Each structure stands twice: as C-alpha cells, then as structure tokens.
Image (tube, rainbow, N blue to C red):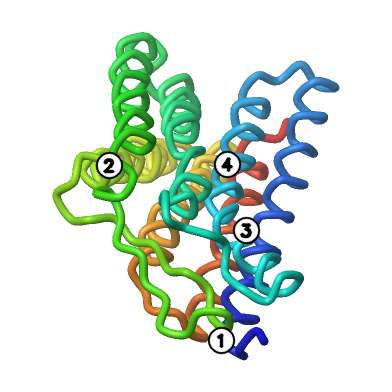
Amino acid sequence: MVSTIGWLIGGTAFATMIVSVVFGIFFLLMSKRLGANLLMYTGFLIICTGLFYLGASVDFLYLIFMGQNIPNESGIHGILSFTSVGPAIIFAMVLGSEILIPEKKKIIVIVFGILAVIFELFLYLDTLNAFVFRNENPGQDLIDSSFVILHPTFLIVAVSLLSALVLCGFGFMIKANQASGELRKKFSFLSIGFILFVICGALDSLVAPGIWLILIRIGMMSYAWLIYFGLKPS
C-alpha cells in the first residue's frame, strides 16, 4: 500500500512529467505554426526536463498497480530519471547561445554536446556507482536516487546547471537591464524562468521528500511558461 508520502512524491512527480510533456508538445506545435526555431528548442527542453521524473513516475505506478517498487538491481530508476539530462543540456545551451551570443553558438554546443555524451556513457556504463538508492519503506515509499558526489555524472550536471545559470539566467538578466519596454519584459521572463529552472532542478534532487517538493515541482512547471512568455511573438 502506497504511503501518504509516497502519494505526495509520486503524484507530484507524475503530474510534473505529464504537464511538462504536454507543454513541450504545445510549444513544438506553436513553433511549427509560427516558424519559430526558439520555441522548438524550448519545446524539446521542456519535454526533456519533464522526463527527469520518469523514474519516480514509473516507480509510483508500479507501487499502485503491482504493490511493490520497480526492480532496481541494475539501477534502472537512475537511468529512467536521468537519461534525458544529456539532451536537456544541449537544448538549454542552444537556446541561450542563439539569443545571447550567436557567434559562439557552435563552440558552446560542441563543448556541451561532448559533456552530454560523456554523461550518458557514465550513466549507462557505471550506473550503480553513479547513484545512491534509498528506500526505507519498500512497497510503500518511492525509491530515492541521488548522485554520488564527485562521480563524473554529478560533476557534469553541476557544471551544466551552473553554466545554464550564468549564460541563461544572468545573461538574460543583463540583457533585460540594457533593454526597455516590451523587450525588457521578455528578457526578464527568460531570466526568471531559467533561474527558477536551475534552482528548482537542484533543490529537487537535494531536498528530502516532503511538502516542500510540491512547491519545487510547481516551480519546475512554471519555468516553462515564463520562457514561453519571453519567446512568444508580440
């Protein structure tokens, strides 16, 4: 039987994943209708970040329908949760570099593309050493997976989040301060959206299961709309 905390963690994870995927598909359809590549990159980014919750969602559904946690001897929970990290890194950097420093876009995408490939290799080839899996109440609570500090997967995620914060969060903030009117508003939306994404993404993997996760996951859903408001045509 799923515990109260299991319903809380699993329900919010499943809701965040579904809402993010729906938002992402909506943005992809909008990009096709408007011919806007930036909305396309945003759509893929939002889908990838929503899939961060795939592991928790599968474990949640497994608990409900099977009465037990997903078999995790091979670390499948970590693989399901973090496979989309590599593509998310690339789409975030493509989006930020194309708007802020298009002349540096190619080198930025190459560097972070290489990091993304390295991340995926360690994720799949060294899964059990990359994560610490915890579950104090099997069959009631969800599996909690967290990165092993100083493992290459953790280091790549940390570098990528900091880079996204600097390039996209602070970069758009600087652009907002330099602009005025509608353009200032759009850059502000983008800045707040990316800062919210980085903070909530980091906290979600650090905060112990509890009521705060609801607010964090609301933040993960909200950042998508902030970025959309920053990119949609006036």
**Distance in Å between CA atoms under marks 1 and 4:** 38 Å
Q: Quadrant of the C terminus?
A: top right
**Distance in Å between CA atoms under marks 4 and 3:** 18 Å
Q: Amino acid at mark 2?
A: Thr
Is 185 placed above or below 112 here? below
Q: Say which of 42 and 233 sits in front.
A: 42
Q: Quadrant of residue 58?
A: bottom right
Name the residue tied to disc 4: 186
Percent coordinates x, y for residue 198 in the rendering: 39, 52
Is 74 placed above or below 180 here? below
Percent coordinates x, y for residue 216 in the rendering: 50, 70
Q: Residue at x 35, y 38 (%)?
A: 123
Name the residue tied to disc 3: 221
- Choose the circle earlier in sequence order: 1 or 4: 1
**Distance in Å between CA atoms under marks 1 and 2:** 28 Å
Q: Nearer the viewer, mark 3 or mark 2?
A: 2
Query: Badge 2, how many Cα within 10 Å: few under 14, some, many 20+?
Result: many
**Distance in Å between CA atoms under marks 3 and 1:** 20 Å
Name the residue tied to disc 1: 5
Name the residue tied to disc 2: 153
- Choose the circle earlier in sequence order: 4 or 2: 2
